[in-house]
Image (cartoon, rainbow, N blue to C red):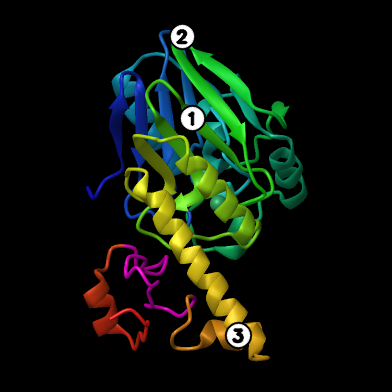
């Protein structure tokens, strides 16, 4: 993975803006370039990162950003929206708007040391609950509500002709899946449905651009978390006790049965390095 955030070309006029290393609040975006306007899929968390995204787009096209589609309500995907001007149309699931308004700008209270810059909430003006098609010139862009999964208002962005899928945080590429504000079972159901799309390219909410294998890799991890939870529940143990156990899915440095998933804070360590650096006792040899 390159050290600097960069645009990655996926098809004609279809780009991903990928921010290494994809950890907490370091999110990706989609850039769909039309003749007269650009459509964004999410837009990063801080003023500085959004300005970088804006500069990267400006190097590609003089067209302004006209539309921003949000994959879900988490602020790391939209706090930078103000950078793209007062004329921006923001589109999101109805429940994403509701949750944004209810939670407000809550991330700075969780991570007060982050240099958020001049960020503010830009509530979606366009909301929907059913599938919607957006046309960026000849490019057909399908906005597909799914879930509850990662959150209660998840939308994936699907380009059927290019077979490019923007999943938002329904998948993490080389990072740990996360669904504490949604549903684990719901995420598994959605991942199964997304596999049927037969995507060529998948852009996750965090981490490098990848192929459809990320869908099953995330599902495998979540099935393992569910198994660990079920075993703990059956044994009468407290959730926190189960989570802190050395072989837990939630234990720092530990891995899923695939050996593929590091914890979110160490997204690029190899399995062997992770095991050497921790007391991980995953069952997979
Ligand atoms: Zn999220």
Residue 84 visible in the shown view: yes
Q: Where is residue 203 drawn, in percent x and y?
A: 40, 40
Chain-order first, disc 3 or disc 1: 1
In the rendered view, tell whether residue 70 sits above or below residue 33: below
Residue beneath the point at 31% across and 18% down? 12
Which residue position is annotated with label 3?
Answer: 232
Which residue position is annotated with label 2?
Answer: 137
In the rendered view, tell whether residue 61 sits above or below residue 44: above
Taking the image as shown, residue 167 lies to the left or right of residue 61, namely: right
Secondary element under disc 3, as helix, strand or loop, is helix
Q: Where is residue 246 drawn, in percent x and y?
A: 44, 88
Chain-order first, disc 2 or disc 1: 2
Q: Where is residue 172 drawn, in percent x and y?
A: 43, 53
Residue beneath the point at 51% across and 48% down? 191
Chain-order first, disc 3 or disc 2: 2
Q: Main secondary structure of the magenta part?
A: loop
Which residue position is annotated with label 1?
Answer: 158
- Label 3 to label 2: alpha-carbon separation: 53 Å
């Amino acid at each position: 993975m390159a050290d600097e955030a960069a645009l990655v070309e996926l098809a004609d006029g279809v780009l991903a803006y990928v921010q290494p290393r994809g950890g907490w609040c370091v999110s990706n975006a989609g850039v769909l370039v039309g003749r007269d306007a650009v459509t964004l899929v999410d837009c990063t968390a801080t003023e500085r990162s959004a300005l970088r995204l804006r500069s990267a787009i400006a190097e590609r096209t003089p067209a302004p950003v006209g539309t921003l589609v949000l994959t879900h309500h988490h602020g790391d995907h939209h706090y930078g929206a103000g950078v793209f001007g007062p004329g921006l149309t923001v589109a999101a699931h109805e429940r994403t708007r509701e949750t944004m308004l209810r939670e407000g700008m809550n991330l700075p209270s969780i991570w007060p040391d982050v240099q958020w810059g001049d960020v503010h909430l830009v509530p979606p003006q366009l909301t929907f609950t059913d599938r919607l098609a957006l046309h960026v010139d000849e490019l057909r862009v399908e906005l597909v509500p799914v879930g509850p999964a990662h959150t209660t208002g998840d939308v994936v962005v699907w380009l059927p002709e290019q077979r490019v899928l923007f999943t938002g945080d329904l998948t993490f590429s080389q990072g740990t899946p996360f669904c504490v504000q949604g549903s684990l079972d719901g995420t598994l159901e959605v991942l199964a449905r997304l596999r049927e799309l037969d995507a060529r390219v998948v852009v996750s909410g965090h981490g490098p651009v990848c192929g459809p294998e990320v869908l099953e890799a995330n599902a495998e991890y979540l099935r393992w978390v569910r198994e660990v939870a079920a075993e703990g529940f059956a044994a009468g143990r407290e959730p926190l006790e189960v989570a802190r156990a050395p072989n837990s899915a939630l234990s720092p440095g530990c891995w899923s049965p695939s050996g593929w998933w590091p914890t979110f804070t160490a997204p690029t360590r190899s399995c062997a390095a992770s095991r050497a650096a921790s007391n991980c006792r995953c069952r997979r040899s």
